[in-house]
């Protein structure tokens, strides 16, 4: 026969476990939504920068064939857009930025990527 007070003694632990389980389920849902929003923002920013470089390469290639080895174009195509967890993401982007600066320097052109236009207050604090 069970002690009639067992359920009362375990009441605090029962409520604690129920609260933990409920909080965990809520955290999973909220965390996924927050991760989705951050992923969309970062993905947009990366896509925008890649598009900027792609546009520069297209202009250079059609106007004066500045990059005969098409190294920058290869780096843009090599970027793992559909695999953001790829370990080469940062290395490829760093190489793109370096190659871009080298081409601009050889052309004696001052051209910088400043990102999507933001409010004037935000734009003052942001540099690449």
Image: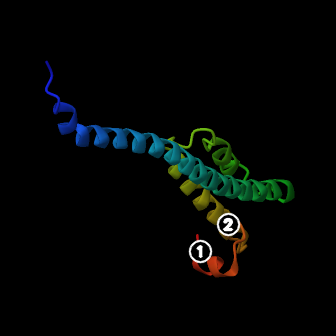
Q: Looking at this rendering, what residue extends furthest in the top direction?
A: 1
Residue 101: x %, y % from top left: 63, 65
Name the residue beneath numbered marker 2.
115
- Residue located at (52% from left, 48% from top): 30
For disc 1, the neighbor class at 10 Å (few under 14, some 14 to 19, many from 20) is: few
Residue 110: x %, y % from top left: 70, 75
- Residue located at (64% from left, 81% from top): 121
Front residue of 36/55: it is 36
Whether label 2 touches label 1, CB < 8 Å:
yes
Up/down of 6 relative to 13, above or below? above
Q: Is residue 38 visible?
A: yes
Q: Looking at this rendering, what residue extends furthest in the front direction?
A: 4
> Quick one: label 2 or label 1, which is nearer the N terminus?
2
Front residue of 13/106: it is 13
Residue 126 is labelled as: 1
Q: Quadrant of the N terminus?
A: top left
- Residue located at (67% from left, 58% from top): 49
């Amino acid at each position: 026969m069970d002690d009639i007070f067992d359920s009362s003694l375990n009441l605090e632990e029962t409520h604690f476990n129920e609260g933990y389980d409920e909080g965990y389920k809520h955290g999973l849902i909220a965390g996924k939504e927050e991760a989705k929003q951050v992923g969309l923002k970062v993905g947009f920013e990366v896509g925008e920068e890649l598009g900027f470089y792609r546009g520069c390469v297209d202009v250079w290639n059609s106007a004066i064939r500045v990059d005969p080895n098409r190294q920058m174009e290869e780096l843009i195509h090599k970027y793992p857009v559909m695999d953001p967890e790829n370990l080469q993401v940062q290395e490829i982007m760093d190489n793109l930025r370096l190659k871009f600066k080298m081409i601009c320097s050889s052309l004696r052109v001052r051209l910088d990527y400043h990102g999507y236009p933001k409010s004037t207050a935000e734009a003052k604090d942001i540099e690449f």
